[in-house]
Image (tube, rainbow, N blue to C red):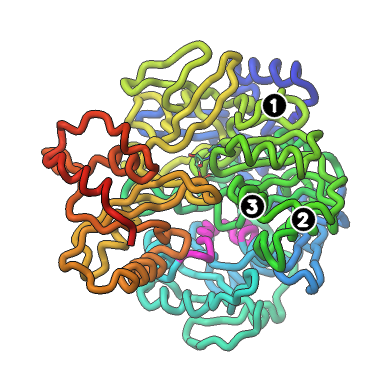
């Protein structure tokens, strides 16, 4: 097991060592895992390529570290504890031994359907144990998983399948989500009409609803399991072989496939999991994220299982059957570490304390937050009502691209400051730069957040387009990884993340590119042009505000609004639906034709009295018109 930090002095010593001798430090952590062959060199890197390799020449399989190596010591301990959507349905648990066999069985099914090392497999599934099992089964046979959040539309799913030229998709018949039943297979069927590389669609029976059947490619998972062995030797992987692709939004319309590799990701997710959450033997750890996002990859599946933890998975939503569900589950399963998103905290806060009071939250030891800046009010509500003012809150800053938590308190060790992610983990070297790229030193400063030295779980490329990886992350400030976030460092060196500085909106902790939403809206036959910005939203953190120009004046605003929402749902998914839509005659553009979003953002958040200089606009009068306009 990697080093478990026990005190603040220990953290400081370790941090200093990780900066003075990163290779020695990470070699020591990595040596606690099971490798088929040890690495030849700890690190090769340059950020110009970028070309970053950790544990060069090392051979391993991450699932041997998540499963096999625990069998002797904790074979009968619960690995995954699953709580269904419907509280009257029974929870299911898998011990490490049961999980090992389940993963081997699924791995054998993948192999029997022609999946080999290096093939891409798309997972589009509800939050059921089979999703975690499928993730691990891919890793076991050396296939690259690409999990797509099951709230994305068939079009978004097809784009992701095609970008990665996946050979197989694994889905379910349906998905129980709160009071709704989502027709997962119908969505996949629609997507597969335009996905020529898919050979097999493996379907888990979850809801039992009727589904259309295409015998040439559809296979029921329970039928595929028949006669399959529950032992499956793990494929030997190079430390730098791809482990997975995960798509995320950026400033352009096309989502990018962030690539993570086996060795470094393994070492960093285990190390960060244990130290941030201070997980103790026997604890029940619960992260409420969906495995469709990076948080679920790193801190529901890989990090906890690598550390031999009991990790809980929840199928449902926080408000079903009522807004007390999270707290009811914490009481029922005696949860010790609880990790959620600010948007969930705000939504539950709005429902009132009567949903919290009935439950005994005495088992909780650590609270966590992730995905977006947590505001002062939500932080205190969490602290007062869930933590009874006595628990550490770890505000963890990180990204899909960073693979693991980068800046965060270590629970009970790092002095807390509300709404601050506080200090970098060992091995992480953040720097603040100004717009010209000069390093801003000292404390009580603000700027753009970069990282100046590689860490093991950083992205290696964007799938199929290395240039894009270079341009987006490594070109703005040569020699540094640029996060896209603005940040403040306080008087004593604590970091506070301010939010995105690019054209990415963070809606309920989910990243959505403004260009993606604009492209979707522009598909409406009557829309000539649109511009989308984020604005502060009480529950979601940021809401989506769309300005649209129509070709012909719409006769019925209600219909137009409904049509636009439906197009966005169809092209991206319901998470990207605009909250506000305003019809305008023109957009504020510079003489070179660039939309000045700064102005649109100010109008959207109601601070249009502070517009600043608008003299560079082609037609400054559009601003007044937009400001006086009304929503449809
Ligand atoms: C934001 C989620 C403030 C940030 C793990 C980042 C945060 C983006 C925090 C990444 C936090 C994440 N405080 N902002 N604790 N955590 N963010 O890729 O803007 O879905 O760049 O990864 O979320 O989102 P992603």
Residue tagged by mark 2?
A: 354
Bounds of the magenta segment: 135-152
Q: Which mark is residue 350?
A: 3
Image location (x, y in percent) of residue 445: 47, 17
Q: Nearer the viewer, residue 77 or 315?
A: 315
- Disc 2 crowd rating (10 Å Cα; few below 14, some 14-19, many 20+) is few
Q: Looking at the image, which residue sits at the far front?
A: 628
**Residue drawn at the location 28% of the way across and 33% of the way down:** 611
Q: State which quarter of the image contains the N terminus.
A: top right
Q: Secondary structure at mark 1?
A: loop
Q: Is residue 120 left or right of residue 24?
A: left
Of residues 519 and 64, the one nearer the viewer is 519
How far apart are labels 1 and 2 at the CA level?
28 Å
Residue under label 1: 416
- Measured in 3D between alpha carbons, the distance from the residue under mark 3 to the one under mark 2, in whole angstroms, is 11 Å
Q: Is residue 273 left or right of residue 114?
A: right
> Is residue 282 visible to the viewer in this orientation of the structure?
yes
Res. 302 in view: no
| Quadrant of residue 170 within the rendered picture | bottom right
Residue 556 versus residue 385 in the image, above or below: below
Q: Closest to the observer: 246 or 224? A: 246
Horizontal and vertical percent position of residue 124: 54, 67
User: What residue is rendered at 46% in x and 44% in y?
Assistant: 536
Q: Nearer the viewer, residue 503 or 58?
A: 503
């Amino acid at each position: 097991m990697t080093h478990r930090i026990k005190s603040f002095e220990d953290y400081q010593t370790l941090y200093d060592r990780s900066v003075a001798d990163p290779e020695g430090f990470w070699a020591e952590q990595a040596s606690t895992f099971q490798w088929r062959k040890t690495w030849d060199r700890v690190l090769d890197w340059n950020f110009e390529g970028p070309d970053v390799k950790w544990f060069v020449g090392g051979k391993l399989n991450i699932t041997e570290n998540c499963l096999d190596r625990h069998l002797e010591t904790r074979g009968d301990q619960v690995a995954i504890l699953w709580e269904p959507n419907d509280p009257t349905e029974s929870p299911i648990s898998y011990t490490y031994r049961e999980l090992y066999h389940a993963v081997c069985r699924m791995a054998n099914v993948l192999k029997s359907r022609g999946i080999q090392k290096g093939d891409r497999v798309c997972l589009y599934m509800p939050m059921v144990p089979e999703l975690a099992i499928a993730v691990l089964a891919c890793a076991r046979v050396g296939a690259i998983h690409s999990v797509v959040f099951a709230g994305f539309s068939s079009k978004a799913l097809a784009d992701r399948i095609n970008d990665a030229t996946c050979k197989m998709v694994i889905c379910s018949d349906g998905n129980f989500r709160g009071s709704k039943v989502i027709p997962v297979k119908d969505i996949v069927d629609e997507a597969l009409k335009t996905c020529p590389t898919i050979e097999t669609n493996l379907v888990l029976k979850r809801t039992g609803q009727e589904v259309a059947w295409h015998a040439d490619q559809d296979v029921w998972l329970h039928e595929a399991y028949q006669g399959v062995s529950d032992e499956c030797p793990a494929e030997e992987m190079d430390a730098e072989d791809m482990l997975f692709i995960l798509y995320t939004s950026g400033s352009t319309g096309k989502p990018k496939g962030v690539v993570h590799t086996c060795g470094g990701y393994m070492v960093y997710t285990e190390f960060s999991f244990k130290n941030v959450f201070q997980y103790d033997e026997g604890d029940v750890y619960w992260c409420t994220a969906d495995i469709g996002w990076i948080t679920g990859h790193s801190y529901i599946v890989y990090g906890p299982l690598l550390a031999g933890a009991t990790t809980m998975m929840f199928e449902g939503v926080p408000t079903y059957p009522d807004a007390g569900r999270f707290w009811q589950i914490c009481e029922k399963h005696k949860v010790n570490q609880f990790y959620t998103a600010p948007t969930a905290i705000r939504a539950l806060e709005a429902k009132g304390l009567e949903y919290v009071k009935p439950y005994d939250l005495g088992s909780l030891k650590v609270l966590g937050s992730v995905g977006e800046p947590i505001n002062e009010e939500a932080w205190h509500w969490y602290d007062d009502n869930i933590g009874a003012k006595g628990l550490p809150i770890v505000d963890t800053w990180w990204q899909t691209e960073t693979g693991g938590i980068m800046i965060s308190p270590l629970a009970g060790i790092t002095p807390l400051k509300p709404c601050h992610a506080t200090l970098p983990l060992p091995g992480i070297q953040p720097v603040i730069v100004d717009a010209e790229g000069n390093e801003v030193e000292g404390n009580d400063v603000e700027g753009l957040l970069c990282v100046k030295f590689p860490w093991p779980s950083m992205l290696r490329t964007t799938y199929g387009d290395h240039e894009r990886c270079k341009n987006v992350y490594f070109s703005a400030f040569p020699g540094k990884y640029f996060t896209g976030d603005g940040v403040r460092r306080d008087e004593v060196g604590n970091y506070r993340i301010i939010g995105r500085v690019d054209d990415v909106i963070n809606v309920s902790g989910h990243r959505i590119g403004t260009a993606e939403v604009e492209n979707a809206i522009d598909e409406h036959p009557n829309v000539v042009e649109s511009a989308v910005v984020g604005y502060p939203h009480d529950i979601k953190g940021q809401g989506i505000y769309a300005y649209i120009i129509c070709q012909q004046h719409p006769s019925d605003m209600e219909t137009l609004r409904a049509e636009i929402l439906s197009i966005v749902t169809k092209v991206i998914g319901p998470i990207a639906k605009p909250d506000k839509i305003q019809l305008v005659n023109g957009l504020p553009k510079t003489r070179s034709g660039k939309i000045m979003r700064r102005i649109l953002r100010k109008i959207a958040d109601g601070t249009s009295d502070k517009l600043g200089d608008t003299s560079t606009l082609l037609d400054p009068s559009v601003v007044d018109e937009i400001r006086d306009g009304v929503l449809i």
